[in-house]
Image: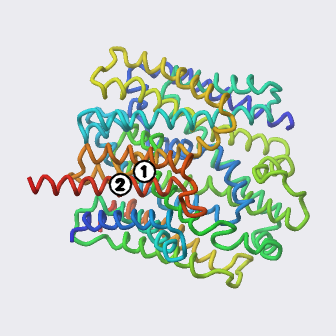
Amino acid sequence: MRTPALARYALLGAGIATLVACFVGGAPATFAGALAAALFPPALMLLPDRDSRPPWWIVAMAASLAAGMSVVMFWSGSVTVAGLPAATWVSGLLLGAVPFVLVLYGVVLRGGRS
Amino acid sequence: MDGSSALAAVAYLAVLMAIGVWAWRRTNNERDFFIAGQRAGLWATGLATTAASFSSFVFLGGPGLMSRAGLGALFIILPAGFTAGLLCRVVGGRLRQLSGAGVLTVPEALDARFPGGTVRGLAAAAILLGVVAYLGLQLQGIALLLRSVVGFANPDLALAVGLAVILAYSVTGGMVAGLYTDVFQGGLMVVAAVAVFLRALSVGGGWSRITADLAAHDPMFLEPTGKLPAVTVFGFFLVFGVGVLGQPHLLHKFFMIRDPRHVRYLPLIFGGSQVLCLSIWLGIGLTIPALVATGRLDALASPDHATPVFLMEFLPGAAGGVLVAAILAASMSTADSFLNIGAAALARDLPRAVGRPLRHELRWARAAVPAIALVALLFSRWYADLIALVGTFAFGAFAAALTPALAVGLWWERVTARAAAASIVTGVVVATLLEFFLRDAMAPGALPAAAALAASFVVLLGVSWLSAASRSAA
């Protein structure tokens, strides 16, 4: 499957999962909605791509966001580091800082190439 | 407020007026009025986009929301790390490319992709509705600030002064004035935000002390989702992370870039300045609750008072004046951007969508600016209680209406005009129904804008696939 087609299927799946999370509720649906929220941005990033394989930095971004959302869902009440729970530090890094670095690398330095 | 704050506000308004006069002499045609003659450099575009993207919510509402809801409120701003890159890669380059072919507005870009006028007309109508709501909210914020800072006793007078300044430079200088006032305002916002962040850390006793105080007195505050349900924070992340692709006041900035190669480097300036600007959210949002929790500050009458209380208690004199000017800048830069795209929708897109372009477009666009401002003003006066809700709703409605048609439609040739139109209608209708009439149908804490955005994507993709399948079968 070519990358743009993969992106479109990911967007459709994420859209349906988000709707289920918004209307059904409950832990499994909410987790699916969280993963959907994580998949939307990298899937959109893939739309302009014409290669057969997605660029590694977009795959890494998807992995970082999905891992961050999983931390938010399943890890709380953890030990604190400088006052903040460890889960907060880790989710903040995975959802904010790592994607920031990857996007600067991919869009600015590489000009969006693989 | 002391005299320094009032002086800063007056000086700030005077600078805007001066830029308006300067821009007036450089606005000669529609291209100047709508896209600043496409003369914007990298730094100007980056700072102007940051100024337009952040309203007073970042300075007032955001720290207030964090004071009330804990770190879950950060899910609104966490996506700022990648939204600039997302915007530039997915839609920015394409929009800049289209502007080379004479496209001056977002609905016009959609018309270039989906000819016929229907998609353009629907997009322009959605933009006009959103502009009135969002502009009304900004006008209320400006009036509130002028009243409390400059000391206008009459709320209508405060509103009139704020509006008069915006109109003066928007009518005369169009987007040339909008661009360069936004550059000035964006720079001011970044400087003020970083200074306040550092001051907040100092007042709270440093990062470790602040977070340790919160951990000791209110541990839920520091959990990843704070005091909010998980479905709410994921909704924030989706709407603010992806919905940025459908915000016409940001997209419009790409038409103004002089050199298309600059789009690639824009995330550095736009994303970097956004991150710096958001430091104020973190600084005040953490420090005020920590001070209250440890008894060093009286409890706030309302969480929304976090920034005003910080201003009064810890930023006396000129420093407070700079923050006041920065908050005004956040509101006014967003307001002028909306006035310009609203004027373009009314004077250019709607008439052309029905096949009746206006003969003197520049003249009509100038006339449209005060007309739109007047409608927003009346709206904000008559529906004062409702406008915060409607203004917040407008961001989600823009996102749901325009994001799929632009982001997917500009790249996938199989998207039809019918699919794009269905997606725009779905976004607006679902967002409206869920926000105002059917909220109980949703899971507790779920965001109507998130559901509307998802529904709009599903409809766009679904209708496109079904159209292709029916064509193959035929």
Distance, label 2 to label 1, CA atoms, is 8 Å
Q: Residue at x 36, y 50 (%)?
A: B91
Evaluate if marks 2 and 1 touch, with contact meaning CB atoms under 8 Å apart. yes
Residue named by callout 1: B245
Residue A93 horizontal/vertical position (percent): 56, 73
Which is nearer the eye, B244 or B429? B429
Quadrant location of the N terminus of chain B in the rendered image: top right
Q: Is residue B196 left or right of residue B31?
A: right
Residue A57 horizontal/vertical position (percent): 38, 71
Q: Residue at x 73, y 73 (%)?
A: B220
Residue named by callout 2: B90
**Number of other residues with Cα within 10 Å of mark 1, as a class: few under 14, some 14 to 19, many 20 or more:** many
Q: Is residue B346 left or right of residue B119?
A: right
Which is nearer the eye, B362 or B464? B464
Q: Earlier in the sequence, mark 2 or mark 1?
A: 2
Height in image: A111 above or below B384? below
Q: Is residue B316 left or right of residue B38?
A: right
Looking at the rendered image, the disc whose residue lies closer to the viewer, 2 or 1, is 1
Circle 2: residue type: Val
Residue B10 horizontal/vertical position (percent): 74, 29
